[in-house]
Image: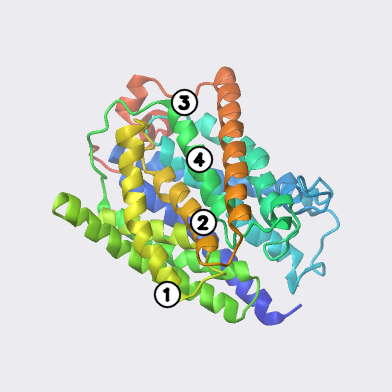
Amino acid sequence: MVGADTAWIIVATALVLFMTLPGLAMFYGGLVRSRNVLSVFMQTISIACLMSILWLAVGYSIAFGAEGGVWGGLDKAFLSGIDADTVSGTIPEVLFFAFQMTFAIITPALIVGAYVERISYGFVLVFSAVWMLLIYAPVAHWIWGGGILADGGILGEVGAKDFAGGIVVHETAGLAALVIAFFLGGRKDKSKPPHNPGMVMIGASMLWVGWFGFNAGSQLAADGGAAMALVVTHISAATASLSWALWERFRHGKASMVGLVTGTIAGLASITPASGFVGPVEALIIGAVAGVLTQEACRFVKGMLKIDDTLDVFAVHGVGGIFGTIMIAVFGAGAWGAQLGALVIVGLYTIVGTALIVVILKALMPMRVDLEKETTGLDLSAHGERAYDITS
């Protein structure tokens, strides 16, 4: 084991968890109405807790076991055969387990943004559990197999490149968000703006900082590759923030803070798959395009498709991750066939699989709260608490 690598991945693991708790929770919480902010916090932290246990039980083994190219098997369930001295590359395998656990946490947590303000808390937990085990973990194995830098899965073996999760995290979460929003239906009242733009900005900033662990940590080493991944991540985020704001000002006459930081997340999602394969100039291009592309995708989903993906998970994360994956081929770091093939295969699997999960669970348990609870707000109706003395 290399001490520097171990120390860096310990830090990166904490940074990626920081993305979800509290980063994503605050980002999403600020975007909803005040009567629903605690429900978003509750959904996010509950998913983090549940995914951690499921990752230990079987998720890690499915994703990173060695049984085959399609499915990792259950040999590593409950970390069987792994102790403090077991090594994965240059770091302890138990640390690799923990690092990947934070990815398994944030991916279903991203989907929260699609169904806020109207979904049953019980459905959130059951759906997230089943989805992580049946969609996320197998896809992680297909792309990353025995590890992020190993081509152990069936798609990795044919040359598909995804450095830190453009396909595994962002495409799967984005498409799942679109599917669940379609089945759930739109909110009864869509007129209210974000209740706390300041909270949105703080959450986005936390995500930005945490993303250094997400992308630079995916190098699994404390070296120049990790440093470059960190730099291109920052450049893409900064550029996309500005390009979103400029495009918003061009279209609407004003650049909003919520819009700018949404551009930040779009730039981060878009650079994620390419962060280990491109330099600063390519990152500048990716970020510049991402800020405009994802903004238009938001308009398309809600305006043309009429799907209430409430916090634009598909437009920002799904489109961003897909775009970044394609840019790997554009810049010559990956083969077109492998990149597009992986996107299509994973996309179809995610859409069909998520739809089946939703249909089956919907037949077994309530998916949506009733109108009275939706009007009252999920904070009070589902959890018996409220974030503020006065709700809006």
The residue drawn where x is 60% and y is 29% is 357
Which residue position is annotated with label 1?
A: 281
Precedes in sequence: disc 4 or disc 2: 4
Closer to us: 158 or 42: 158
Q: Is residue 80 left or right of residue 286?
A: right
Task: Name the spot of residue 39 as percent of width and height, x first.
Answer: 41, 39
- Residue 289 is labelled as none
Identify residue type, mark 2: Ile
Task: Name the spot of residue 204 as percent of width and height, x first.
Answer: 37, 59
Which residue position is annotated with label 2?
A: 326
Mark 3 element type: helix
Q: Are marks 3 and 2 in contact (CB under 8 Å)?
A: no
Precedes in sequence: disc 1 or disc 2: 1
Task: Name the spot of residue 114 as percent of width and height, x first.
Answer: 42, 38
Which residue position is annotated with label 3?
A: 183
Task: Name the spot of residue 32 as percent of width and height, x first.
Answer: 32, 42
Q: Quadrant of residue 379?
A: top left
